[in-house]
Image: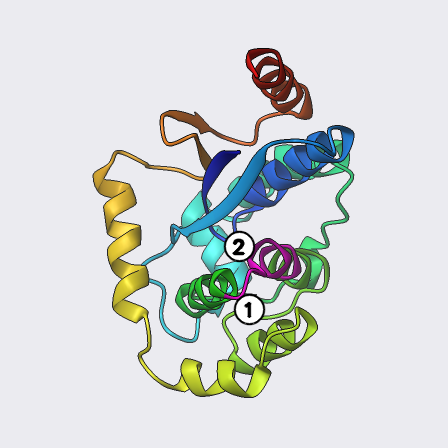
């Protein structure tokens, strides 16, 4: 088996697109050797706990409405190529994703990590839900087969907050500056939303080596 350590943030559109391209490759090679593990990287580690208005966030980040529109044109184009239905006009809040990363961490303990990651992306980019909200996260946990009541109790506590913050800092300390970043077999870092063809090539090369 070959481990893919994926550093991503559930509000990162390129992470969502990159996952879709990877998923397509894995579907075409159902006997693939990859084991996926998701790791925290917050795009906005200093985001207020309750998040902020989406339009204000984008216009501040990209220098106004025009800059925000121009920045997201390639996102929309690549999302279509990846077969994703992204409804940017449904998103009203840019959340703090610390709690979402805690949920991903807990889902990993239960063997439901990739399912929860997929649901977080869909909830945010397709349904426009606030994935910084504890009720939304508990609902996603329930849909993934986790104990929603337990998740709510954990979210009300500081459980694993330091774990997530330290792992985020460790990634930056290793030189990761953007996501998605995929580390293959603990050795090769693959940055960006790579196309399905690249992952198929990697899988075929691994098959030849085996």
Relative side of 89 to 65, left or right: right
Relative side of 99 to 177, left or right: right
Quadrant location of residue 130? bottom right
Q: Is residue 172 magenta?
A: no
User: What is the quadrant of the C terminus in the image?
Assistant: top right
* Structural crowding at the residue carrying mark 1, measured as other residues with C-alpha within 10 Å and reported as few (<14), some (14–19) or many (≥20): many
Residue at coordinates 54% horizontally, 59% vertically from top-left?
A: 55
Percent x, y of residue 126? 72, 58
Look at mark 2 in the image and give the residue it sits on: 11
* Structural crowding at the residue carrying mark 2, measured as other residues with C-alpha within 10 Å and reported as few (<14), some (14–19) or many (≥20): many
Relative side of 125 to 84, left or right: left
Look at mark 1 in the image and give the residue it sits on: 131
Residue at coordinates 49% horizontally, 37% vertically from top-left?
A: 4
- Point out the residue furthest to the front here: 210
Q: Is residue 92 above or below residue 149?
A: above
Residue at coordinates 55% horizontally, 68% vertically from top-left?
A: 131
Magenta residues (range): 110-119
Main secondary structure of the magenta stretch: helix
Tell me the tag on residue 112.
none
Judge by depth and name the residue closer to the eye, 79 or 182. 182
Percent x, y of residue 122? 68, 58
Closer to the N terminus: mark 1 or mark 2?
A: 2
Is label 2 in a helix, a strand or a loop?
loop
Judge by depth and name the residue closer to the eye, 3 or 193. 3
State how far apart marks 1 and 2 are (Cα): 9 Å
Would residue 180 be seen by someone viewing this image from the given angle?
no
CB atoms at circles 1 and 2 under 8 Å apart? yes
Residue at coordinates 57% horizontally, 35% vertically from top-left?
A: 34
């Amino acid at each position: 088996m070959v481990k893919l350590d994926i550093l991503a943030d559930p509000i990162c559109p390129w992470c969502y697109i990159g996952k879709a391209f990877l998923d397509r490759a894995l579907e075409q090679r159902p006997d693939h050797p990859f084991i996926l593990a998701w790791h925290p990287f917050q795009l906005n580690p200093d985001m207020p706990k309750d998040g902020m208005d989406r339009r204000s966030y984008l216009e501040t980040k990209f220098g106004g409405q025009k800059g925000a529109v121009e920045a997201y044109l390639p996102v929309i184009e690549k999302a279509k190529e990846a077969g994703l239905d992204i409804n940017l006009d449904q998103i009203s809040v840019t959340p703090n994703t610390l709690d979402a990363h805690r949920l991903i961490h807990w889902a990993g303990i239960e063997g439901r990590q990739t399912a929860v990651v997929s649901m977080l992306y869909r909830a945010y980019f397709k349904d426009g839900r606030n994935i910084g909200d504890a009720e939304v996260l508990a609902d996603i946990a329930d849909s993934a087969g986790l104990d929603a009541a337990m998740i709510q109790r954990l979210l009300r506590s500081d459980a694993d907050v330091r774990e997530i913050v330290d792992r985020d800092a460790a990634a930056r300390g290793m030189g990761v500056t953007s996501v998605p970043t995929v580390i293959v077999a603990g050795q090769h870092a693959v940055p960006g939303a790579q196309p399905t063809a690249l992952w198929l090539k990697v899988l075929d090369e691994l098959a030849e080596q085996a």
